[in-house]
Image: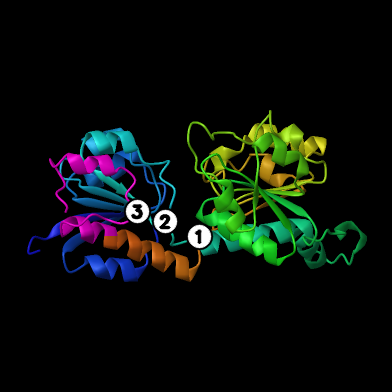
Amino acid sequence: MSQLYRVLLCGNVIAAEGQRLLEPVAQLSQVGDYCTEHDRIQAACTVDAMLVRTGAVTRALVEASPNLKIVARHGVGYDAVDVDACTEHGVLVTITPDANATAVSEHALALMLAAARKVPQADAALKAGKWEREPYLGIELAGKTLGLVGLGRVGSKVAQLANAFGMTVLAADPYVTAERAESVGVHLMDLEEMLPQADFVSVHAPLTPDTHHIIGPKTLPLLKETAILVNTARGGLVDPVALYKALQAGRPAAAALDVFESEPFDVDDPLPRLPNVIVTPHVGGQTDDALVNMAVGAAHAILDVFEGRRPYGLVNPEVLANTSRVQVE
């Protein structure tokens, strides 16, 4: 591998461990979080690979980048990548399937506990000089029912954590068998059947046309008035307008959100300001361990392609039949 490749890093923070893997064989350049599409296209037009933590990989970008061989996602979601365009042009798309599942699942539990015990509200009041106990009457997780929307890697880890808290765990996922669900202590059922039974609902589905606003006007009324909704997956899975109206009407009782349909969200958005809403800025997968795992995993995928190997976490394997850009064993 004597050729020096060009790799574009997309995101403000890409762990040094991943960058060091690429430095011997590639010239690295970088664009920051939420840069414009024009700037990203300008930076990508001569590169052989992109390691993408933030920002969209659009059809226009793919078509403007004739040397691009792989888009390696720093994470598991690829809804911001035009996979069809990549496939048409012979560009591989990879994810890092196992890298941040522990971090995201633990954050989902943290939000669940914070909402159940009203931790942010009590903290804010106490720091404002108010010693009040009655407004912060909480609920316990033990003995409650958790409903998971999606039972992939993260959902399965959340199920295992919830089982340790003594919760009953249900899940709705059309791509998972009952046997697979039972292996992680989960009872599988349809979404419409699950939601009315759940004291907590945690969303862990991928964002696709079929799952867009899966929690919305038709499903929110199925929740208990006392239910708590948690979303650490993708903002587009939950209809924010419908959720705002539902929370104002008292069904569900509260929501804890790490992801939003538009990120960063508008400062005038009323949803995050509701007193029964807890928000964090898409940090579910942001731990030291997870960031290193994702950067290293994405870098290894790029190196695999440069060295003629099939990369792990390949989203569009049909590209391998098209050898115009990529040749792997």
The image shows residue 20 at horizontal and vertical percentages of: 26, 70
| Count of marks, rendered view | 3
Residue range in magenta is: 301-329
Q: Which mark is residue 97?
A: 2
| Residue 236 part of the magenta-drawn span | no
Alpha-carbon span between mark 1 and mark 2: 8 Å
Q: Quadrant of the C terminus?
A: bottom left
**What residue do we see at 21% from left, 67% from top?**
23
Question: Which quadrant is home to the N terminus?
Answer: bottom left
Please report whichever mark, 3 or 1, sits nearer to the chain's N-terminal start: 1
Q: Position of residue 152 (x, y in %)?
A: 52, 51
The label on residue 101 is 1
Q: Residue sitting at 7 percent across and 64 percent down? A: 2
Is residue 232 at all visible to an observer of this figure? no
293 to 39, vertically: above or below? below
Asked if one can make out residue 166 in the rendered structure from this viewpoint, the answer is yes
Q: Is residue 171 left or right of residue 51?
A: right
**Residue 93, image x, y percentages:** 30, 46
- Label 2 to label 3: alpha-carbon separation: 6 Å
Q: Amino acid at mark 1?
A: Ala
Q: Position of 59 compared to 170: left or right?
A: left
Q: Mark 2 or mark 3: which comes first in sequence?
A: 2
Asked whether the beta carbons under mark 2 and mark 3 sit within 8 Å of each other, the answer is yes
Q: Which numbered marker is on residue 313? A: 3
Residue furthest front in the image:
179
| Residue type (three-letter) at the residue carrying disc 2 | Pro
Which quadrant of the figure has residue 62?
Answer: top left
Color scheme of the displayed model: rainbow
